[in-house]
Image (tube, grey):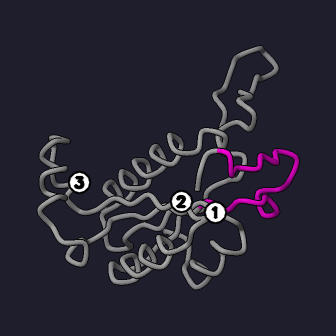
């Protein structure tokens, strides 16, 4: 999905927005690692699709005039899945031309040095990767079909 593919619709409910954004997290991760995985994939989505944030670059302003940075106008659901489902979901989503896929492989949380993470990633075959989170953004119906049987992270 390219940046120009985002149709900003801040006038619609998040349930009717043309785009759907979900982050699917490994249901067996401890809470802190699950939140870290979701936050890191969300940051990468924000970088890839800046139009998702605050619609047309608009920040919010409260009644006292304080500025609140733009939040995702399409909303974002955080769902849970086991590791096998995460891997399969990533594969299915990556095959879709109009879906942005951002993933967090396990080495991203076990390494404290980014270059080390990249080296670990480069030395691991795709089929051997374990994912801690997968973020997906795309057309509402396409994303819904991919994650329709998953539940909210609890």
Residue 99 location, quadrant: bottom right
Q: Are marks 1 and 2 in contact (CB under 8 Å)?
A: yes
Disc on res. 100? 2
Q: With 31 as the anchor, is 121 left or right in this view?
A: left
Question: How far, Cα to Cα, is label 1 from label 3?
Answer: 26 Å
Q: Which residue is mark 1?
A: 138
Q: Which residue is mark 3?
A: 109
Residue at point 16%, 55% (across, down) = 110
Which residue is nearer to you in this view: 70 or 141? 141
Stretch of the chain drawn in magenta: 4-21
Which residue is nearer to you in this view: 152 or 149? 149
Q: Main secondary structure of the magenta part?
A: loop
Question: How far, Cα to Cα, is label 3 from label 2?
Answer: 21 Å
Neighbours of disc 3 within 10 Å: few (<14), some (14-19), many (20+): some
Residue at point 60%, 38% (across, down) = 50
Residue 71 picture location, percent across and down: 65, 39
Q: How many marks?
A: 3
Local SS, label 3: helix
Question: How far, Cα to Cα, is label 1 from label 2?
Answer: 6 Å
Q: Quadrant of the N terminus?
A: bottom right
């Amino acid at each position: 999905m390219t940046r120009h593919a985002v149709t900003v619709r801040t006038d619609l409910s998040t349930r009717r927005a043309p785009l759907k954004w979900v982050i699917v997290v490994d249901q067996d991760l401890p809470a802190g690692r699950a939140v870290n995985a979701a936050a890191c994939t969300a940051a990468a989505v924000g970088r890839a699709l800046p139009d998702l944030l605050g619609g047309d670059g608009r920040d919010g302003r409260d009644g006292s005039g304080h500025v609140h940075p733009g939040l995702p106008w399409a909303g974002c659901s955080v769902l849970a899945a086991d590791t096998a489902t995460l891997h399969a979901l990533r594969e299915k989503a990556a095959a879709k031309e109009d879906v942005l896929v951002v993933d967090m492989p396990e080495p991203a949380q076990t390494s404290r040095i980014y270059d080390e993470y990249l080296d670990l990633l480069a030395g691991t075959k795709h089929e051997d990767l374990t994912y801690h989170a997968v973020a997906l953004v795309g057309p509402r119906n396409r994303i819904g079909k991919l994650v329709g049987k998953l539940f909210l992270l609890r």
